[in-house]
């Protein structure tokens, strides 16, 4: 199944004006179903005379798949985008609305511009301290999925990380506890999750049995884009299929040996739904690292922030300072030590990233301001 709800390319209807009008109304609805709105319409105005709008549904190694009113096309980026891109985040990502030039007969297109993103979910690129990888854009809701089939697939710490990133994205997070059919005590897991995310909606579901999935429809529908995130094997693709009512996403059998799912989803993909709205399926992100600002970090740990207000020092790091309310809470058992350690770890990553960014900014400043540098060189010489 293709990402476009309307799979076939639009047949030519130019010979019949009335038919064309109907066609246009339908295709416009198609784009709206897929998330097109007045925000994008406004930003598309400058491209309107030359290009048509499309949404990126897949990102493969050397090309993109886009969905437009002409159907689904294979697209490449223009030299202009390539040359102007200063970092990875400036390339198109799944979920982006783009301005394209279409060659419908060939089934191809060229992407000439990326419209501003309403929201974006990103993570740090492994091995690159400052480059961000944009996982999905223009999403309204993030389904953070975990499985309750056993402790191996369930991790509160991982959930905290995903939550921090989700908050940063601008989309609303929703937590899904999947595989309830394999769980004796779902209430136990719900309580655990509620303790770290008291303000986030939690749904207990089974993607394969379709229990609890009906309630998820409220997050879908015309104009909405939901991204599914979570470790490999928790059932993201199975949920795509349950919500689409069709086997559109490949799912993996769980390995007998360690209970982990095979990596059947190898790339991110956006699926348009029959009743409007879109779902973005993603592969598991094994080494999820942080790309976030401090605000979202603190929002994910409101209990620690609150405790921190009672520390003796305003700038207490909650590590070795005297009269630290956070350390006291750990000693008295009111704050979970594992949660505290996770907080420290995420904060450390965050601090390292900030440092690295500052260094790069400094270097960039020197490059941008060569005059000052010559002056510096001169003064250095004079000193000698
Ligand atoms: N028993 C049970 N198995 C599930 C459920 N959801 C997914 N699975 C199975 O878990 C495995 C991994 O699912 P998949 O959707 O590929 O996970 P993904 O990697 O997150 O996309 C597959 O064998 C699914 O059939 C569920 O609610 N109950
Ligand atoms: Mg999958
Ligand atoms: Zn403290």
Image: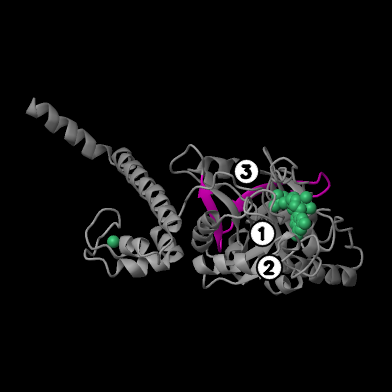
Residue at numbered disc 3: 78
Residue nearer the viewer, 19 or 3 = 3
Q: Badge 1: how crowded within 10 Å, few (<14), some, or many (20+)?
A: many
Quick one: label 2 or label 1, which is nearer the N terminus? 1
Q: Residue at x 29, y 39 (%)?
A: 366
The label number, if any, that marks residue 204 in the structure image: 2
Q: Residue at x 26, y 66 (%)?
A: 311
Q: Quadrant of residue 260?
A: top right
**Would residue 96 be counted in the magenta stretch?**
no
Q: Residue furthest left?
A: 383
Disc 2 under 8 Å from ligand 1? The reply is: no
Quick one: label 3 or label 1, which is nearer the N terminus? 3
The label number, if any, that marks residue 148 in the structure image: 1
- Magenta-colored span: 102-124
Estimate the spatial distance between the alpha carbons at disc 2 and disc 1, rounded to whole Å.
9 Å
Q: Nearer the viewer, mark 3 or mark 1?
A: 1
Q: Residue at x 61, y 66 (%)?
A: 188
Q: Nearer the viewer, mark 3 or mark 2?
A: 2
Look at the numbered discs 3 and 2 and tell me whether their residues touch, using CB distance below 8 Å.
no
Q: Position of residue 368 (x, y in %)?
A: 32, 41
Is residue 249 visible from the viewing direction of this image?
no
Estimate the spatial distance between the alpha carbons at disc 3 and disc 2, rounded to whole Å.
44 Å
Dot 3 lies on which element?
Answer: loop
Q: Position of residue 285 (x, y in %)?
A: 60, 47
**Would residue 115 be counted in the magenta stretch?**
yes
Is residue 338 visible from the viewing direction of this image?
yes
Examine the residues drawn in magenta and state their main secondary structure. strand
Asked whether, in this view, residue 160 is left or right of residue 41, the answer is left
Estimate the spatial distance between the alpha carbons at disc 3 and disc 1, rounded to whole Å.
45 Å
């Amino acid at each position: 199944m293709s990402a476009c709800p309307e799979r076939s390319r639009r047949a030519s209807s130019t010979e019949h004006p009335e038919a064309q009008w109907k066609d246009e109304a339908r295709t416009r609805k198609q784009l709206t179903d897929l998330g097109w709105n007045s925000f994008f319409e406004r930003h598309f105005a400058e491209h309107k005379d030359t290009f048509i709008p499309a949404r990126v549904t897949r990102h493969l190694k050397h090309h993109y798949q886009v969905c437009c009113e002409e159907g689904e096309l294979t697209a490449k980026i223009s030299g202009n985008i390539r040359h102007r891109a200063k970092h990875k985040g400036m390339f198109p990502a799944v979920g982006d609305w783009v301005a394209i030039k279409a060659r419908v007969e060939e089934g191809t297109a060229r992407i000439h511009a990326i419209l501003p993103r309403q929201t974006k979910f990103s993570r740090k690129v492994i091995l690159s301290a400052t480059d961000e990888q944009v996982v999905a854009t223009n999403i309204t809701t993030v389904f953070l999925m975990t499985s309750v089939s056993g402790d191996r697939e369930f991790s509160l710490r991982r959930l905290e990380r995903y939550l921090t990133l989700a908050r940063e994205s601008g989309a609303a997070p929703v937590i899904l506890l999947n595989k309830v059919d394999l769980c004796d005590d779902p209430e136990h897991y719900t309580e655990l999750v509620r303790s770290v995310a008291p303000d986030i909606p939690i749904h207990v579901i089974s993607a394969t049995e379709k229990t609890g999935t009906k309630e998820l429809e409220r997050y879908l529908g015309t104009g909405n884009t939901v991204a599914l995130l979570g470790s490999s094997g928790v059932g993201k693709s199975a949920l795509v299929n349950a919500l689409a009512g069709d086997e559109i996403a490949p799912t993996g059998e769980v390995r007998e040996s360690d209970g982990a799912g095979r990596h059947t989803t190898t790339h991110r993909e956006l699926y348009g739904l029959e009743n409007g709205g879109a779902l973005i399926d993603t592969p598991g992100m094994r080494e999820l690292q942080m790309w976030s600002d401090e605000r979202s970090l603190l929002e994910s740990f409101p209990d620690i922030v609150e405790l921190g207000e009672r520390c003796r020092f305003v700038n207490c790091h909650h590590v070795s300072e005297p009269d630290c309310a956070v350390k006291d809470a750990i000693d008295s058992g009111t704050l979970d030590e594992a949660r505290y350690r996770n907080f420290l770890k995420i904060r450390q990553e965050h601090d390292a990233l900030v440092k690295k960014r500052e260094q790069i900014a400094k270097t960039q400043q020197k490059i941008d301001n060569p005059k000052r540098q010559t002056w510096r060189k001169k003064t250095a010489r004079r000193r000698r």
